[in-house]
Amino acid sequence: METLIEVKGLSKSFGALRAVSDISLSVTRGEVLGFLGPNGAGKSTTMKMITGFLAPSAGQVAIAGHDIEQAPLAAKAKLGYVPEGAPAYGEMTPAAFLDFIADVRGLPRATRAARIAEVVAKIHLEKVLHQRIETLSKGFKRRVGLAQAILHDPEILVMDEPTDGLDPNQKHEVRTLIKEMAPHKAIVISTHILEEVDAVCTRAIIINQGRIIFSGTPLELAERSRYHNAVTVIVPVAARERALALLAPLLAGHAVEQQDVGGDCRLTLLGGEAPLSVERLQGALRDGGCELRGVFVEHGHLDEVFRTLTREASASGEVHRT
Amino acid sequence: MNGFTTILKRELRAYFATPVAYVFIVIFLVLAGVATFYMGGFYERGQADLEPFFQFHPWLYMFLIPAISMRLWSEERKAGTLELLLTLPIPLAASVVGKFLAAWIFTAVALAGTLPLWLTVNYLGDPDNTVILAGYLGSLLMAGGFLAIGACISALTRNQVIAFVISFVICFAFNLSGFPMVIDMFSAWAPQAVVDVISSFSFLTHFNAIVKGVIDVRDLVFFASLIAFWLYANVLAIEMNKSN
């Protein structure tokens, strides 16, 4: 697949503060790259350099083959960008704003109105088209920002926290939109919502203190979890001891975590030498006459992996400094 | 320069989309009228000219122009639209010039609102209309100079009040740079050549020369190069101060 974003050795310092250090990555057409990291990790700064807002202290960015510093206009023409908070001119209406963007993007007169109408319909802006942007709700403002970015149907789309502050329905809509566009574009989104990575991204990068500490598919990320392939068995609280006794012969070095939720006891079996067979666990409990209220295989807790990775990195970072 | 006209159009529309334009134009016209008729003694002088009108322009512009220019870049910074603007395929210089020119056209519209005064003086007497035309030209050039200063200062801060106050002080200094209060600050220690240069920056001197109907190329070059200098500084102010 053709590489549309190529970032090499990107660094940015603000005075003595090193916000981004030596980040390299590439995104091909059809990929959706999720940028993860704690607040202040350098996600936004990296995106600002990729989109040509900030000049890097070191390193290069190529957008569809155009160097963002050497040929900024050619690179920016290929790019759609939703900056953090989706800023737009408050005194304009979405209709006027999109017309302005169409003008900037050089959309041909003949097809301009049709293209704007198409994007407006896709993003559901019809109702607020002639209201001033500053009077719109957060969700609509975000949509205006999104409409602006995709108006010229860019090959490359960069979005800084596109779903931040949206309600669950709106989040779902934005994610659906991203998935629809994904096959034809290279997309980078930053987020600190981990479910989003699972929902839309084909690849995830975790940044901490300006460095990449993980790069892989969402599945690979989940595999790092202690809970990857763990099995959770739900039994009544009263049957806890009995269930533990029945399950014990099947375990091989597995740890058992217990959590009571209402009248249910959740027994999570994790670690161990080999993955457990759900059928055998169910069989053992059934044969022993223990009531089974549910059983499922965990595929991994992304937030736990995220916490572990970013904390580990911070701790080792502190060691390096001393 | 496709981006330039796009920015120019957007900015011009922005003035008239908010009450700012109307408030400014009304205040400008009222103040200009008050100054002309009461302080300038338009009727009492018994002369058919617009000198009492033009002589107050440097002082009106000194605080009215920063009121226009303060929002040019501060607002973009504060609203976050600066990031949007600078990641669109428009050269920065086109945005800087486009915004400046839109503001300048806007002040020209406000100035055009004083044309009834010109009609009045023609009705009452027989003025030298070329001198009046020169007055309008001088006034417009001076407004451009103040606007370029204000735009550059606005690029340095996200706070419009700070942009206003600093622009006001600089405009004031440029007005007075031929006067003792500014000259005395330098004459004690700076060589005479420097003092001469500073006093030659006086907007008042250049403006008064044009208003008298003497259009000297040097006065035109003064305002043109001053505008160019501050616009260039405006570009640098944004380039160097983006992340703020």
Image (tube, coloured by chain):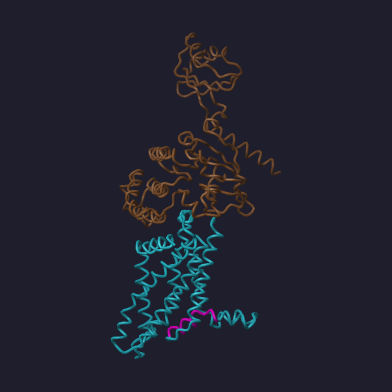
Chain colours: A brown, B cyan
Q: Quadrant of the N terminus of chain B?
A: bottom left
**Helix, strand or loop: magenta stretch:** helix
Residue occupying image coordinates x 52% and y 44%:
A5
Front residue of B17 and B229: B229
Front residue of A298 and B240: B240
B201 magenta-colored: yes
Residue occupying image coordinates x 54% and y 23%:
A230
Q: Residue furthest left?
A: B123
* Residue B171 x %, y %: 50, 74
B225 magenta-colored: no
Residue occupying image coordinates x 48% and y 42%:
A186
* Residue A150 x %, y %: 41, 47
**Corner quadrant of residue B34:** bottom left
**Corner quadrant of residue A314:** top right
* Residue B93 x %, y %: 49, 63
In the image, is residue B30 above or below residue B163?
Answer: below
In the rendered picture of this protein, how many numbered marks are placed on residues? 0
* Residue B160 x %, y %: 47, 63
In the image, is residue A276 above or below residue B156?
Answer: above
Q: Residue furthest bottom?
A: B46
Q: Quadrant of the C terminus of chain B?
A: bottom right
Bounds of the magenta segment? B200-211
In the image, is residue A79 above or below residue B209?
Answer: above
